[in-house]
Amino acid sequence: MTLDGLRPDERIAPARDLRAHLDHWSRVTGIAVEVWALPREPLALPLAELVQATVLDILNGFEADGTVRHVGFALTAGAGDLRLTVSGDGIGLPPGRLAERLQVAQARFAAWGGRLSVNAVLGGGITVSATLKPGGAERRPKRHR
């Protein structure tokens, strides 16, 4: 079932749905994905949408890199906080270009009171980290007018 077909009060189980998405992406791209952690409890729909959109942006960036052959993935959530880490071993896409691709994701996390950062090690890959602090997961994003 897609997110579009869910009622706002339904919850998404990342351990099932996100793992299936990562497995599918890995099969299609040929890029290996190692899942380090997924939450046991389902995420509220708004957070699940935030995570899904962010992960899609990151994976698209890694795929565009052209040199990524292995991705590590961790998502933890609990007590009102959320942590997402996605690492790729590629070296082809300049870190600034990936950061540009992730500006929308950075704005989404900022609207929830969180943070998304891109860290690159020359010749050693790129890690994208996103966090929502305790209490941030309960807040609704700020509306821009």
Image (cartoon, rainbow, N blue to C red):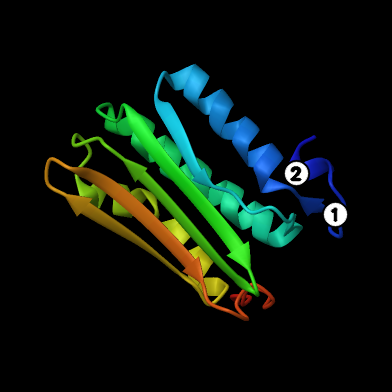
- In percent of width and height, residue 10 lies at 85, 54
Q: CA distance from mark 2 to mark 1?
A: 10 Å
Q: Residue at x 64, y 74 (%)?
A: 80
Callout 2 crowding tier (Cα within 10 Å): few <14, some 14–19, many ≥20? some
Split into 4 quadrants, where in the image is the C terminus?
A: bottom right
Task: Say whether residue 93 is left or right of residue 40.
Answer: left
Task: Say whether residue 130 is left or right of residue 48.
Answer: left
Q: Residue at x 75, y 57 (%)?
A: 45
* Snapshot quadrant of residue 118: bottom left
- Element under label 2? helix
Split into 4 quadrants, where in the image is the N terminus?
A: top right
Q: Residue at x 73, y 56 (%)?
A: 41
Task: Check disc 1 and give the amino acid type.
Answer: Glu
- Residue situated in front as seen by the camera: 8 or 12: 12
User: Does residue 24 lie above or below 86 as drawn?
Assistant: above
Callout 1 crowding tier (Cα within 10 Å): few <14, some 14–19, many ≥20? few
Q: Which mark is residue 105?
A: none
* Snapshot quadrant of residue 103: bottom left
Task: Check disc 2 and give the amino acid type.
Answer: Leu
Q: Residue furthest left?
A: 122
- Residue situated in front as seen by the camera: 13 or 50: 13
- Residue situated in front as seen by the camera: 14 or 105: 14
Q: Earlier in the sequence, mark 2 or mark 1?
A: 2
- In percent of width and height, residue 94 lies at 19, 44
- Element under label 1? loop
- In percent of width and height, residue 127 lies at 32, 51
Q: Residue at x 36, y 53 (%)?
A: 128
Tag 2–tag 1 contact (CB < 8 Å): no
- In percent of width and height, residue 23 lies at 56, 27
Q: Which mark is residue 10?
A: 1
Which residue bears the numbered disc 2?
A: 3
Q: Residue furthest bottom?
A: 135
